Image (cartoon, helix red, strand yellow):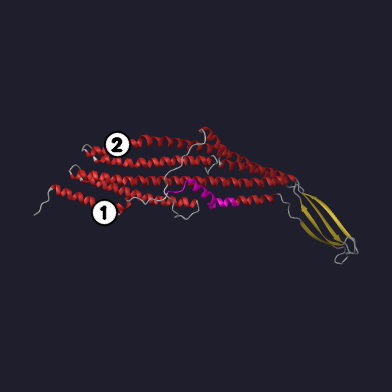
Amino acid sequence: MFVASRSMLRSIIVAAVLVLALAPNGTAQSLAPAPEAPPAPAVDTFVERALARAPSLAARRERIQAAQSAIRAADALPDPMIELEYQAFNFPRYTIGSDPGSMIGASIRQGLLSRGRRTARRSVAAVEATQRAAEQRVMAADVATEVRVQYARLYVIDRERDTLTDAAELVRMLESTVTARYATGGADQASVLRVQLEQTRIGQRVADLVAERTAVQAAVNRLTNDPPDTPIGRITGLPPAALPGEAASIVAQTARSAPAVALRQTEVDLASRQVDAARQELKPSWSVGGGAFWQGGLDRMVKFSVGVELPFRKERKQLPLIAAAESERRAAQFELANTAIDVRAQATGLLAQYQNAIDQIERYQHALLPQNSAALDATRASYLGGRGDFVSVLDEFRRWIDLRTELAGREADRFSAQARLAALLGSPSQ
């Protein structure tokens, strides 16, 4: 009966492990490098496309056009009233031509608007159009910022995918290290199984990244009004982002130039114009009229008239409306102050995020990554020399993946913070 030696048995196990690791299963397929996709256009290309094609912005532009068209009608006079009149003395006898009080004719009456009323109504309509434009700028800033944030998310996903592709190569190197030691009796079977587990975990993370990228890509395509499955190439890097000035000046500037603050200011202006318009309604309304009547034969009669509104109900009707308009103006002023405070707080927080991201990126590039690479090489060499354990190698390997993924996240944080600051400064397209 054939009895295999211990060394032969170990060789058989190593061969079996390698066959399992290299078998064409789901794990091996997931570790295969992704096909090299063409690089994606710069983020500004997506921003310009979104600002030009987003249906939400198109709807805002139409509302601006509607408000501007309404300005022309704001101070228009009311339509004139025409009256047909028949007067007959000793009715039902027909006495036109025989009695000077009997006649037939028509008259017309035109209501008038004072100059103050017309000016106030034009001002209200003009500020409403300005408010629509301010709303459009707020939405444009939101759309541009969202495009940049989603673009940064795609960058993180693509960088992590690149890291995992490199990690797959590194895990193969670890596999060769373990199998070499296992063949000589310097490692146990658990170490080989741990390597296989790491391969499976990498495949799992790659699959999650593919699903996440599909979702983020659909979000970008929604903003640019493209089909959800329109491919977006690989994001190889984020553009450099620098702050336009000192932190203190940026915070002060956002309180003045943020689109949300400008929108609140138009609300204050509109409320002020509505107060003026309500006060103008206290003044009496006038009307003029005229008519021509036929009295029979060649006799004609013409009349002219001037009418004035009796202000019996002005105080009961108009004064409460003025008080309501003044309350609306005060509320708009408080909301403007609150928005300015909120914008300054946002700017302060974003500046802190931006500076922290800058500092952390430098820490990753000049300390964490070099230290981790050196630690990984040292633990692997120690393990090969029989002085270390494989768990320490795996710990450094996992840290190697995490640190590179975290660096991409920090770069995305920097870019996103700068994009949000640009939106607060009123420059979403930059």
Find residue 325 and report its image quarter.
top right
- Residue appearing at x 46%, y 45% in the figure: 149
Tell me if residue 222 is in the magenta stretch: no
Vertical side of 94 occupied by 255: above or below = above
Amino acid at the residue labelled 1? Ala
- Residue appearing at x 41%, y 52% in the figure: 214
Q: Is residue 336 visible?
A: yes
Few, some or many C-alpha atoms within 10 Å of disc 1 (few <14, some 14-19, many ≥20)?
few
* Mark 1 vs mark 2, CA separation in Å: 31 Å
Tell me if residue 57 is in the magenta stretch: yes
- Residue appearing at x 61%, y 45% in the figure: 131
Q: Position of residue 148 (x, y in %)?
A: 48, 45
Q: Which residue is mark 2?
A: 375
- Magenta part, dominant SS: helix
**Span shown in magenta:** 39-62
Q: Which residue is mark 1?
A: 23
- Residue appearing at x 50%, y 41% in the figure: 420
Q: Earlier in the sequence, mark 1 or mark 2?
A: 1
Q: Residue furthest left?
A: 1
Q: Is residue 282 visible?
A: no
Residue 237 falls left or right of residue 430? left
Vertical side of 329 occupied by 301: above or below = below
Find residue 341 and report its image quarter.
top right
Q: Position of residue 345 (x, y in %)?
A: 51, 37
Residue 13 falls left or right of residue 271? left
Residue 344 falls left or right of residue 200? right
Amino acid at the residue labelled 2? Ala
Quadrant of the drawing holding the N terminus: bottom left
Judging depth in this view, the residue of 420 and 226 nearest the camera is 226
Q: Position of residue 363 (x, y in %)?
A: 38, 35
Judging depth in this view, the residue of 199 and 159 nearest the camera is 159
